[in-house]
Amino acid sequence: MLEMFHVPHDIAVRVAQQDIRSTVEDIFRKMGMGDTDARQSADVLIYADLRGIESHGVSNMMRSYVEGFGKGSINPKPKWKVVHETDSAATIDCDRGLGLAVGPIAMRVAIQKAERTGVGAVTCTNGRHFGAAAYHAQLALPHDMIGMAMTVGGLRVAPTFGSKPMVGLNPIGFAAPTRKEPPFIFDASMSSVAGNKIALAKRLGVPALPGWIAEPDGTPIMDSRPIPDDFLMLPLGATREIGSHKGYSMAVMVDILCGVLSGTGPGYKNRGMASHFFAAFKVSAFNDVEKFKSEMDDFMRALRETPPAPGHERVMYAGLPEHEAEMDRSVNGIPYHPEVVEWFKGTVAELGLKDRLPATRK
């Protein structure tokens, strides 16, 4: 994630991961979730925060989840069920369950099917937000599998040349195992910038960069300016000249795999509902596992040892900076904006829960 989205060091409040994890679990239980789902949901969010993916951690997402539970749009105790199934595929009705809880279940179904058949794929309908796509994809890694996760929700992106939102942010998560090098874990929306990063930018007073957003009529904004109240998101690539048709088409691809394939339909027809797609590929069904991991190690090492271009310190690959952030934050705590800590303090006080968080600086 770009440094501009991280909380400045001079104001950040470092919180031990167990303290924020327990706090989040408490809030989820208060919202009506069972213990298992509360722990699983908190794990998805803390994974994001530990790895520096603040856009999908507790800072942004807990507020919307609490609001969703309060309005009844999220079912705290979903009775999810498999509505269609073959040996290698399945469709799950999430019963309006939070994707943080139901998503990992669906991914594990895909993994179980891949264990038996080599490839497993699961689509989900009637779902809700599932957090960072990378979390679900990386569940395949301990099984010597490649994992993929996609989701449709948040109808905010205008098609190339379009004047109204027709596709979602539609992120793709992809994880491939290694032996010694940090695994390759990719997670990105098919929009010019993740929608949640707009919320981070507003909190931090960061202006929109050229190509992030468009005027309400769809005209791309190609200068840096404060984020307006009314805007459209642009596809990955921003404009046709620099590739927005690619990001737009990939967003449609995600919509097809998640929404149309599951029977939900494309996102523009289902505001407020999320649909997901999960897949697992058993490496041994295609290749020798150790040979694959050795080749992956060589590949990742070659990428990070690539000579950097002038003005840059090093070359990285997806998953490497997140791995390094996790090593630091696991020991030194997760840095949060004081406003976020104060929100949690106010929320736990209102809900009558224990306050485990440190005082913010005055």
Image (cartoon, rainbow, N blue to C red):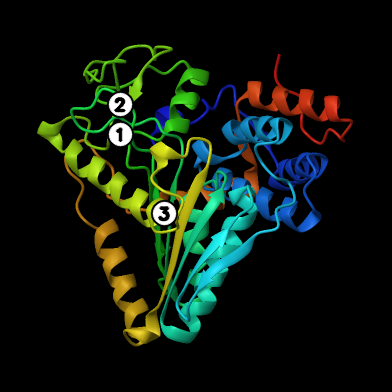
- Residue 36: quadrant of the picture: bottom right
- Residue 268: quadrant of the picture: top left
Residue 179 image offset from top left, x and y in percent: 42, 75
Q: Secondary structure at mark 3?
A: helix
Q: Residue at x 45, y 35 (%)?
A: 154
Split into 4 quadrants, where in the image is the C terminus? top right
Three-letter residue code for mark 3: Cys
In front: mark 2 or mark 3? 3
Split into 4 quadrants, where in the image is the N terminus? top left
Image position of 8 with respect to 93: above or below: above
Does 294 sit left or right of 248 as displayed? right
Task: Report the number of discs.
Answer: 3
> In this figure, which residue is indicated by the disc labeled 3?
258
Badge 2 vs badge 1, beta-carbon distance below 8 Å: yes
Badge 2 vs badge 3, beta-carbon distance below 8 Å: no
> In this figure, which residue is indicated by the disc labeled 2?
212
- Residue 224: quadrant of the picture: top left
Q: Residue at x 41, y 27 (%)?
A: 4
Q: Nearer the viewer, residue 321 or 207?
A: 207
Three-letter residue code for mark 1: Ser
CA gap, disc 2 and disc 3: 25 Å
Q: Nearer the viewer, residue 246 or 327?
A: 246
Three-letter residue code for mark 2: Trp
Q: Secondary structure at mark 2?
A: loop
